[in-house]
Image (cartoon, grey):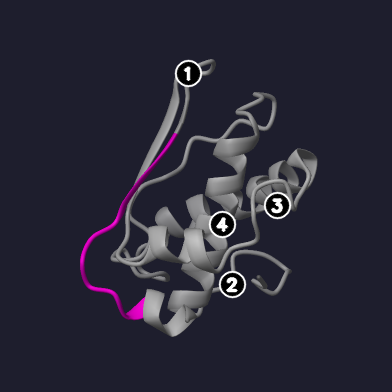
Amino acid sequence: MEKKAFAQKKGDTVEIASDETEYQIIIIEPGFNFWLQSIARPEGYYSQSFLENRNQIYVINWNQRVLSPSQYSPDLYVLQIDYDPNIDYGYEVNYKLYNYFIYFQRKYNQRLGPFLPRI
């Protein structure tokens, strides 16, 4: 089923937003929405603190790769992510961002931290 998500060519658009913090990420990645709905662990599986801790590590590594286009593909790492660990973005934002990082790592065979990107 995961290979089906990775093979999709039609663009999915997933918006990650929080009205309280005016925070927004728009992910245009073929297959991500399908993967999120059918393969990712359901909302509530992880605690918000777990998601925040992992997202902080993933964002740091992501942003370092954006700033190193000669070392990491600028086709994969396009824009930096502004993620402040002192801001409470809420559960949904952290859940979708975390799952995008897992999807991205699994699809493109990348490692954004010391953890294996497991489902």
The quadrant the C terminus occupies is bottom right
Reply above or below: 73 against 48. Answer: below
Residue at x 64% of width, y 55% of height: 42
Depth-wise, is mark 4 or mark 3 nearer the camera?
Answer: 4
Residue at x 58% of width, y 37% of height: 92
Depth-wise, is mark 3 or mark 2 nearer the camera?
Answer: 3
What is the C-alpha distance between the residues marked 4 and 2?
14 Å
Amino acid residing under circle 1? Asp
Asked whether residue 15 is drawn in magenta, I would say yes
Reply above or below: 100 against 118. Answer: above
Question: Helix or strand or loop: what does disc 3 sit on?
Answer: helix
- Please tell me in which quadrant of the rendered image residue 7 appears: bottom left
Pointers 4 and 2 in contact (CB under 8 A)?
A: no
110 sits to left or right of 74: right
Judging by the rendered image, the residue that carries numbered circle 3 is: 54
Judging by the rendered image, the residue that carries numbered circle 4 is: 99
Residue at x 52% of width, y 70% of height: 105
Amino acid residing under circle 3? Arg
Q: Which residues are magenta?
A: 6-16
Q: Which mark is residue 19?
A: 1
Circle nearer the N terminus (4, 3): 3
79 sits to left or right of 59: left
4 sits to left or right of 90: left
Question: Helix or strand or loop: what does disc 1 sit on?
Answer: loop
Pointers 1 and 4 in contact (CB under 8 A)?
A: no
Reply above or below: 30 against 28. Answer: below
Pinpoint residue 33: horizontal percent, then vertical percent. 40, 58
Front-most of 100 and 42? 42
